[in-house]
Amino acid sequence: MTRDRPTQTISPSLPWLLRRPSLIDAVYRAGRFLHDVTVRRVTAVHGGRIGELGVSDLEDELASWMRAAQAGDAVAYRRLLASLADMLRRWVRRELARQGYEVTEAEDIVQETLLAIHLKRASWDADRAILPWLRAVTRHKLIDNLRRRGRRIMVPVDDVLETLAAPEPERSLSTEALDRHLATLPPGQSQVVRAISVDGLSPSETARRFDLSEGAVRVALHRGLAALAAAARRSEL
Amino acid sequence: MKTDELIGSLVADQGHPPESSRRVGAFALPLALLLAIGVFVVLLDIRPDFTDAVTSWRYLLKIALAASIALCGIMLLFRIARPEQAPAQTIKWVLIALVPLGLGVLGEAMLLPMDQWKASAMGFQFIYCLTLVPLISLAPLVATLVTLRRGAPQSPMAAGAIAGFAAGGIGAVIYALHCNNDSPFYVAIWYLGAIGIVTLVGAGIGRFWLRW
């Protein structure tokens, strides 16, 4: 009860300025906000806004996978990224369609977004809701892509709706964009990234193939992925 | 490359999680503070009348204003590092961080006779303030930018500006130990001007370096 905003019962004996509810409300909000910023509880509000049933299940599931992944659970991480890829595909397609772009390019954006989620995963605070974070990262990459694509031929929305309804050839989807960017990387990094992604080798198998230490493979992979994201960002489409 | 293959390589890279901006900042900011103090010690001295000055409210107010800018800047730094945060919401708080300074100016305007305004606003050799504050802010600026690079700010340019604002605030606090122009007028013009320079530099660097 004490946390309710004091807008109602205001004593008439207060000075005129303080009797104005909006002013008291503003001061109260400012105080609450300062408290929230310092105690870092702002997204309790964000999380609450999602509200609907089902969405909160999704929230819990994704957040628990991400937490497990950050604790080192590779299975949970794969599960997270795979279901994110499906979700992103749907989000990105819908968004591209709405803005009148060709949905065939969605997979490029899905892959770039997955890369960004991976590289920036430390910017998600485990105390906060994960869906707003995911939405923000996705939006950022989508805007980034659309900006780079600049003026492109718009396709009529009717065609797009048809494409949306068509069954999606789920995860076998591939793009040439990342391969193109991969080619611009230093050879040491690109061969390691290619061996692990395209050939599906484990880091230790990759180390044996190129006669490197496993640590060197991991470093090359990490730098390679970061360089891949940077190359995608710089690319003119 | 298939999306599945990409996921495979991301999972393989999951082994060493990147440092969060909070952890990087917790290391980089204190280090930068030490470096900035080092620059101060090499170039400048604490003002000779320091022991007298700390008893004057104007001097204390000046330090408090600079410190409030630095603290607000650092708080906003971690706020704008999160992708969910709209830059406009953060920038609004920059303006609120400047409210104490505005009140200080108002107070000074009421206390000081009008014929002394110009002298106290121009102070004594403000050019030092405009050059030395950015100089002292260099190490903090590197630290705030490095901190933000680990984050995922929506707007790289706004994030860079916040990095500059925070770094400029830190520089101003340290420079205030030397400077003997204590009027809020002087602070509002020249300290804020110097912080503005660092803010612009930060925005310029952030625009390119903080993209992700």
Image (cartoon, rainbow, N blue to C red):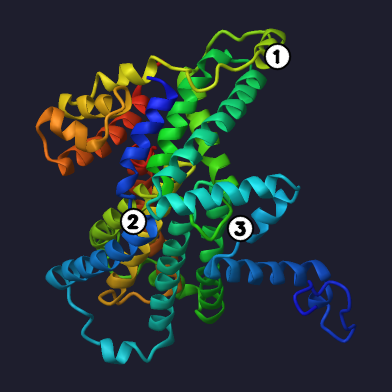
Have a look at marks 2 and 1 and say if they share a chain.
no
Image position, residue B28 (x, y; %): 27, 61
Disc on the earlier residue, 3 or 1: 3
Q: Which residue is mark 3?
A: A43
Label 3: few (<14), some or many (≥20) within 10 Å?
some
Asked whether residue A164 appears in the rendered view, the answer is: yes
Q: Which residue is mark 2?
A: B144
Q: Which residue is mark 1?
A: A161
Spatial CA distance of label 3 from label 2 is 24 Å
Q: Residue at x 53, y 81 (%)?
A: B111
Identify the mark at residue B53; answer none if there is no mark. none
Q: Secondary structure at mark 1?
A: helix
Label 1: few (<14), some or many (≥20) within 10 Å?
some
Q: Say which amino acid is labelled 3.
A: Thr
Image position, residue B115 (x, y; %): 47, 73
Verify CB contact (< 8 Å) between mark 3 and mark 2: no
Image position, residue B205 (x, y; %): 32, 42
Up the image or down, A59 lies above or below A220; here it is below
Q: Quadrant of the N terminus of chain B?
A: top left
Closest to the camera, between mark 2 and mark 1, is: 1
